[in-house]
Amino acid sequence: MSLLLAEFYNSPWVLEQTTHAKMAEVLERWSMGVRLSPDQIQIAVGDAPQTAAQRQERASAASGGGSMVLPVYGVLTNRAHAKAASTVMTSAEELSQQIRASVRDPDVARIVLDVDSPGGSAFGVQEVADAIWEARQSKPVIAVVNATAASGGYWIASQATEVVLTPSGMVGSIGAYMAHIDRSAKYEKDGEKVHYVYAGKYKVEGNDTGPMGEETLAYVQSMADECYASFVQTVARGRGVSVSVASGPSFGEGRMVMAQQAVKAGMVDRIGTLAQVLAEGSPGPRSPGRGLSTAQARMRALQLG
């Protein structure tokens, strides 16, 4: 297996599965030496990079009047700063920096996240979530899901002061996973034998020359479990619910949840569009209860009644 494929399959993902499958297809093709012609690339990619760039420009242009609009589009990666990739990506590191800069900017009264993401690599997502949580202690952070916040995308969005979901949108896919490919049958068919010379008991465990052993499977499962635990604990914090609720059926248990049901479950605060949120303008001075989501603030108001 190529180093690129090994990295892809051995990394934890908080990504909607269809997108993961598409990425795997491209990487597998590359690993086999298959290269598309410029015409084939154009057909496959289309104008996606240009469209993404234009959308980001529109988001930036929408900033003003005290609102800073930050786009959260495409696959989340830890340090993807490439602007001309065929797959739309958001760098977790860069997004965290933008959020902190917006908090420090005295001209920014609120941060608006324009979210449309299937999730991505687990690396860097918790850091973005924490940056949003910290930001909302001093300024309102509004996450507008426009139109999908899946897996890592929802992990991030859930930390906002308020989560607004477009009427046709979806949120959820709460979960984490890793993949293992057993290529032993293919190697045998091709007349290939792979022999590893290594030091370190577990250095080459999980390689693709055979199925996972029980000990390796338990180790990989523990990694997925740890990532998932961080995911649901963070969602519970952001949405003001228990971990059992965040990991339970009302929050989808790994499935996507449509707009109306997401509001009922408390996964989002209300249904609306980015244009409507921007038209509402920036708020005045913060009232007591900073850091609370809209749903939590309503509950506190009722309790103080």
Image (cartoon, rainbow, N blue to C red):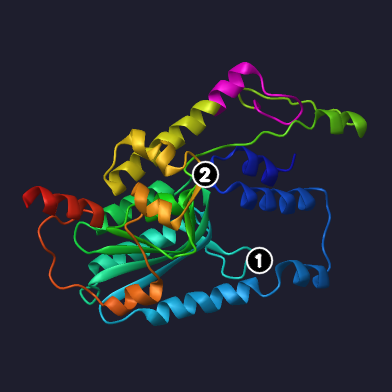
Dividing the picture into quadrants, the one containing residue 88 is bottom right
Q: Residue at x 81, y 68 (%)?
A: 40
Name the foreground residue: 271 vs 181. 271
Pick whichever of labels 2 and 1 is earlier in the sequence: 1
Residue at x 11% of width, y 63% of height: 287
**Mark 1 crowdedness (10 Å alpha carbons): few <14, some 14-19, many ≥20:** some
Residue shown at 29%/75% (left/top)? Answer: 67
Picture coordinates of residue 157, whole percent (x, y): 38, 56
Depth check: give the residue in front, 303 or 160: 303
Residue at the spot of label 2:
255
Foreground pick, 80 / 117: 117
Q: Which mark is residue 86?
A: 1
**Type of residue at label 2?**
Arg
Segment tinted magenta in the rendering: 204-220
| Numbered disc total | 2
Q: Is residue 194 left or right of residue 259?
A: right
Q: Is residue 191 visible?
A: no
